[in-house]
Image (cartoon, rainbow, N blue to C red):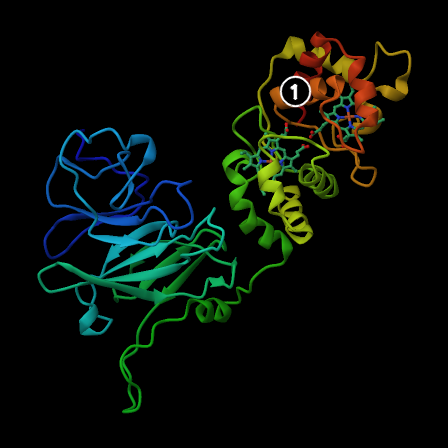
Amino acid sequence: MEVFARGVRNSVGFDFQPKTGELYFTDNGVDFMGDDHPSCELNAAAKAGLHFGFPYYGGGRERHEDWADKQPPQKTTMPVVEFQAHVAPLGLRFNRGDLFPAEYRHDAFIAQHGSWNRSKPVGYRIMRIKFDENGKAVGKETFAEGWLQGTLAWGRPTDILQLPDGSLLISDDYQGAIYRITYRSPTTASAQGVEPANAEQVARQSGLEPKGSSAAGKFKAATCSTCHGIDGNSYHSPWPSLAGQHAAYMVQQLNAFQSGARPSDLMADPARALSEQDMRDLAAYFAAQIPQPKDTEPVLARRGASVYRGENLANPALACSTCHGATGEGNASAGFPTLRGQHSAYTAAQLKAYAAGTRLSPTSAVMRQVATRLSEEDIEAVATFIQALP
Ligand code: HEC
Ligand code: HEC
């Protein structure tokens, strides 16, 4: 094994150019430099040992501010083609067939997965990169689009393969679908040139309509996924998993983050941008996800089970099980959240916040009362027990 190229950021698609044998690959620009910076890229490595600029360059020719005063270790190779920031170029395929008209012969196709955190979404389409007969990139244009309707995307092109007949297969990891784009040469004199395949039409014909609100929620959830995981299972234990949580509870909490009633450094911003409809869509999506079971420390969990059932409480009405259910399933209509499988670090932090009076929302009075009765050890134990609930 050896390093072939350095300074590459988040490259997903690559292919060898049939003409020159050079390795071409896509590269996604860094995030958090604004809506319009920096570019996403198509690169070419004619030989081993080149450096493509990351992290000194955030994308394209734009320096990354954290690295602006540092020099790349060697000469930087700039991209062959630059794309709009955030379009997320993934799959890449050179045309090796002769189904499409002759002017496509040397071209490449790139699947743009679409932006996840740009204020107005971009991408969600297939680009054509035009090459001349010497294998030099000479232009780019949209080849297939329609997955983005206004600001709502209902499909995300991911990868491209070519069938032996020269038609293209496009995968879509949002609908879980594969589209085929083919070409029939015009048989009538009036038909001129190429009619680009319309992805939406192809999808409609195969019975794939845009879905309802959980599907809308899935798309909107892209901005939440860095912290909560794309399927609502967060991988960082201080951040809560949302998978399987009751939708009504989540809407209530999102409102509390938005109004400031539940103060949170990390949630204030994401919540501020949401409309009531967004909240419902997001809650529907996360509620439908499956929580991942977690391993846990058995001795502590056994002690936690006794705390959970309120075995040492004079007032059994304050046992966790009274409201959150015997197995932590909560109660959707009463507004008692599901607890099962939640990261113990998150649960313990919330119990401490209730006790300290820093988790203040109109619905938190009962928990503030409950939590002040728990010792530090009780909190660790019950949080461990809850994490183990399947
Ligand atoms: C930067 C990380 C981050 C992002 C992005 C983020 N969250 Fe959160 N979220 C958190 C943290 C951390 C908490 C726990 C809040 C606290 O302790 O203050 C939380 C809490 C929540 C809760 C309450 C969970 C519970 O069990 O009470 C909901 C619901 C939620 N987030 C939904 C969302 C949605 C929807 C989005 C996207 C629009 C989102 N979050 C984006 C970090 C994040
Ligand atoms: C009388 C009913 C009741 C009892 C008893 C109760 N809870 Fe709760 N619990 C609630 C309600 C209501 C909320 C939502 C509060 C809010 O809006 O902040 C909640 C929220 C929570 C949360 C926050 C969940 C999240 O996702 O952020 C945790 C953790 C929790 N309870 C744990 C416990 C534990 C542990 C016990 C037992 C020691 C317990 N609760 C006992 C009603 C109860």
Residue 383 % position (x, y): 68, 18
Given residues 340 and 112, the one toward you in this image is 112
Q: Residue at x 70, y 32 (%)?
A: 262
The residue indicated by pointer 1 is 349
User: What amino acid is labelled 1 in the image?
Assistant: Ala
- Count of picture labels: 1
Q: Quadrant of residue 46?
A: top left
Given residues 328 and 355, the one toward you in this image is 355
Q: State which image quarter holds ligand 1.
A: top right
Q: Quadrant of residue 108?
A: bottom left
Does mark 1's beta carbon lie closer than 8 Å to ligand 1? yes
Residue 34 % position (x, y): 42, 45
Q: Tell me the quadrant of the picture where the C terminus can be found.
A: top right
Is residue 349 placed above or below 224 in the rendered structure? above
Could you tell whether 271 is left or right of 315 in the image? left
Could you tell whether 303 is left or right of 39 in the image? right
Given residues 69 and 40, the one toward you in this image is 69
SS category of the residue bearing label 1: helix
